[in-house]
Amino acid sequence: MRSATGWLVVCLIAVSIVAACSSSDPARSAAERFVDAYYVEINLPRARDESVGLARAKVEDQIRLLGEQPVAEASSRPSVHYTFLEQQAGDAERDRRGFLFELMISLGGDALTRRALVTVRNDGDGWRAANFQEID
């Protein structure tokens, strides 16, 4: 009985941590889904699905430029982690909002930090990335 209670406590703590790390704001969640697909997973088709407008055009252009090149093996891909920094000031009820993320990118022994501004908009079917840009 004691081990079952311990297991339950561990599960509740794990669920609490996951819930604390994810946003309940659908606009921010859309920005995070795009960052995950585009930067972390390097999954351009999924990033395209998470985007509209200029962001979608940028992703489609990258897909076109890469053409039929095979996807790089996991060992040769950079490792990307990110942190949410801030939401752009403005009306939270607008149909367009911006979110700033810090990207920590490492490949082998090299590492660099970049910032990415992801603008999302509610296009009636939900929130999607409408534009993104990297900032030094």
Image (tube, helix red, strand yellow):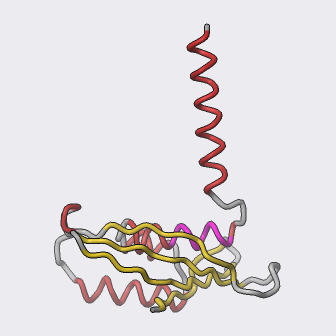
In percent of width and height, residue 109 lies at 23, 70
Is residue 33 within the magenta segment?
yes
**Camera-side residue of 126 and 27:** 27
Q: Quadrant of residue 1?
A: top right
- Number of numbered markers: 0
Q: Which residue extends farthest front?
A: 109
Q: Quadrant of residue 44?
A: bottom left
Vertical position of residue 37 compared to residue 6: above or below: below
Give me the residue at 65% from left, 49% from top. 19
**Camera-side residue of 92 and 65:** 92
Mostly what secondary structure, the magenta segment? helix
Give me the residue at 63% from left, 80% from top. 99
Give me the residue at 56% from left, 82% from top. 118
Magenta residues, start to end: 27-34
In percent of width and height, residue 14 lies at 58, 39
Is residue 46 within the magenta segment?
no
Give me the residue at 35% from left, 71% from top. 42
In percent of width and height, residue 54 lies at 51, 92
In percent of width and height, residue 18 lies at 60, 48
Q: Quadrant of residue 87?
A: bottom right
Determine whether, in the image, residue 115 is placed left or right of residue 19.
left
Determine whether, in the image, residue 69 is placed left or right of residue 32.
left
Vertical position of residue 114 compared to residue 47: above or below: below
Q: Which quarter shows the C terminus?
A: bottom left
